[in-house]
């Protein structure tokens, strides 16, 4: 059974359909990149997967032990988030909020998980530093550690490398790839970096007003949508 299955999903705003009859699925250990033109509905789909935006038609089904509240989410960065006045430790610990439920405090296990994820991502030494004083690459590692604190099965990232230089971007992709392969955590990432998407992802979902594609990265490269987006042929 898939971790997430989207069945004939349509989503929109104020009567205007943005995503129409979408079908795709994410299995354990998959690495899916969601690509597509500006305004094609990528972030809207992310919101629907997280349960923040209701679907108009169809359904999003969770399986294989995944609950909607157990998705590790790394949101698109806003100026407010970049300036968040909290320590690195506090930001990572907030990834345990959903699992804390109604308990008014974090457990020793929550704190152990935080240190484990900070160690894994090489940000342990930054623990007491203020989040807003970090570089863009360090901030994304902290937010990735936070997302990892929330999940054992699936990471959902919305344009995580925006504003990062090519070297830090490459390091971030390598890190994600390692987490995906070694920990068998499925990755779903919205990206405008299509070339890297086909390099790293196992599957591609291309959203577009007139054409949708879902399949393996290899099949995407041979498809009309893929060839167009990767700088080849034009749509006719
Ligand atoms: N809260 C909202 N209310 C009304 N319309 C919205 C809202 N959020 C998004 N839209 C519209 O829905 C469409 C899809 O937006 P969305 O942000 O999902 O696209 P996207 O593919 O993520 O774009 P980008 O690549 O630019 O980030 C756009 O036309 C947008 O204007």
Image (cartoon, grey):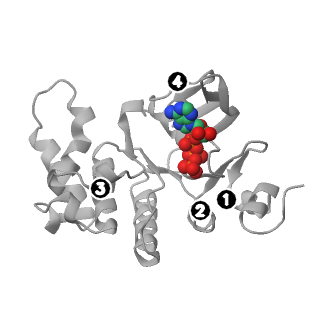
Instruction: Work out how far the residue at label 2 is from the one at label 4, CA to CA, in angstroms.
Output: 28 Å
The image quadrant where one finds the C terminus is bottom right
Q: Which mark is residue 217?
A: 1
In the displayed structure, would residue 15 be above or below residue 135? Answer: above
Residue at numbered disc 4: 54
Nearer mark to the viewer, of 1 and 2: 2
Rendering quarter of residue 223 = bottom right
In the image shown, does 195 or 181 lie closer to the viewer? Answer: 195
Question: Does residue 30 appear to the left or right of 104 in the view shown?
Answer: right
Nearer mark to the viewer, of 3 and 2: 3
Q: Which mark is residue 197?
A: 2
Q: How many marks?
A: 4
Outermost residue toward the bottom in this view:
167
Instruction: Work out how far the residue at label 1 is from the one at label 3, CA to CA, in angstroms.
Output: 32 Å
Residue at numbered disc 3: 82
The residue that appears at 65% across and 39% down in the rendered structure is: 24
Q: Residues within 10 Å of mark 1 (few under 14, many from 20)?
A: many
The residue that appears at 42% across and 69% down in the rendered structure is: 164
The image quadrant where one finds the N terminus is top right
């Amino acid at each position: 059974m898939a971790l997430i299955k989207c069945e004939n999903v349509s989503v929109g705003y104020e009567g205007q359909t943005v995503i129409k009859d979408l079908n795709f699925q994410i299995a354990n250990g998959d690495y899916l990149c969601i690509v597509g033109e500006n305004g094609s509905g990528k972030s809207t789909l992310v919101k629907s997967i997280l349960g923040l935006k209701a679907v108009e038609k169809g359904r999003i089904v969770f399986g294989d032990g995944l609950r909607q509240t157990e998705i590790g989410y790394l949101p698109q960065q806003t100026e407010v988030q970049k300036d968040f006045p909290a320590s690195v430790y506090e930001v990572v610990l907030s990834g345990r909020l959903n699992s804390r439920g109604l308990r008014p405090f974090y457990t020793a296990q929550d704190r152990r998980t935080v240190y484990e994820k900070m160690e894994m991502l090489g940000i342990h030494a930054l623990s007491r530093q203020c989040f807003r004083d970090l570089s863009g690459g360090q901030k994304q590692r902290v937010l990735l550690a936070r997302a990892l604190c929330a999940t054992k099965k699936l990471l959902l990232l919305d344009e995580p490398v925006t504003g990062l230089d090519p070297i830090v971007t490459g390091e971030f992709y390598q890190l994600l790839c390692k987490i995906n392969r070694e920990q068998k955590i499925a990755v779903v990432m919205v990206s405008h970096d299509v070339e890297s998407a086909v390099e790293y992802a196992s599957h591609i979902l291309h959203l577009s007003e007139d054409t949708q594609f879902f399949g393996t990265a290899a099949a995407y490269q041979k498809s009309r949508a893929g060839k167009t987006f990767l700088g080849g042929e034009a749509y006719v």
